Amino acid sequence: MQCGPVRYSATSPQSAPKTLEVFPRLLERQQDEIRELAIQDVFRELTTDLDRNTKIVEDILQAYSEGRKVIVLTERTGHLESIQAGVTGKVENLFVLHGRMSKKQRAILIETLEALPGDAPRVLLSTGKLIGEGFDHPPLDSLVLAMPISWKGTLQQYAGRLHREHATKTDVRIYDYVDAGYPVLLRMWDKRQRGYKAMGYQMSQAI
């Protein structure tokens, strides 16, 4: 029995590839580092965590070496710049989209991105706010979720960037970083797991 209206639901769209996988990355911390902080303080720590950023960069480079078309999303421009520094010189087709760019600069970047052959590997670094409903790049098949988010529309919107049909796409994957040192982030991870399940994603491994 259902009481009241359905506020939000998510399913895997028919156009999405058949294989939808989440690659969870458990990032553990020493027990004395586990503490409750205000969420903005937590996010600030994450963006400057060298070990965490190194793992993110490693995953980006590995996916790129496999010929994948990768989008990396964070909410902070400074974090974007740190990740960019880690992949610069190692990724030929690297694109960076952030809020300090003018509309003309963004348009030129998107035009260059669209001009790539469909099977060419690429990495697009972006803040989440810039890849809303108006953004569409069908070759994308991998999402690196560099900053944690909660469930509801945001996760589905981000994953939706991968669900566009494209001739070279057979599967999609999402890299998700599970920060064990912060109780608030573990609660966010629990919400994302429910969201992934609702969209038909499978975990590549248990953590």
Image (cartoon, grey):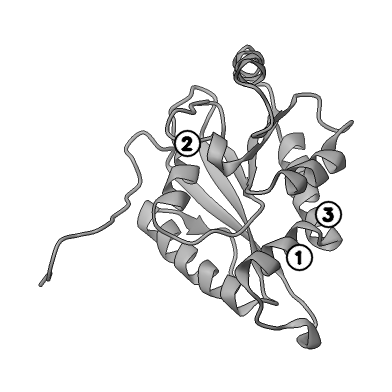
| Left or right: residue 56 compared with residue 71 | right
Q: Residue at (67%, 34%) from the top-left corner?
A: 98
Task: Tell us which disc is closer to us: 3 or 2.
Answer: 2
How far apart, in angstroms, are the residues tagged by discs 1 and 2?
A: 26 Å
Instruction: Decide: few, some or many residues near mark 3? Use Cα within 10 Å; few <14, some 14-19, many ≥20.
Output: some
Q: Quadrant of residue 113?
A: top right
How far apart, in angstroms, are the residues tagged by discs 1 and 3?
A: 14 Å
**Residue 132 - label:** 2
| Left or right: residue 3 compared with residue 81 | left
Q: Which structural element holds mark 1?
A: helix
Quadrant location, the C terminus: bottom right
Task: Tell us which disc is closer to us: 1 or 3.
Answer: 1
> CB under 8 Å between callouts 1 and 3?
no
**Residue 45 - label:** 1
Q: Residue at (78%, 82%) from the top-left corner?
A: 33
> Is 100 placed above or below 186 here?
above
> CB under 8 Å between callouts 3 and 2?
no
Q: Quadrant of residue 6?
A: bottom left
Residue type indicated by callout 1 = Glu
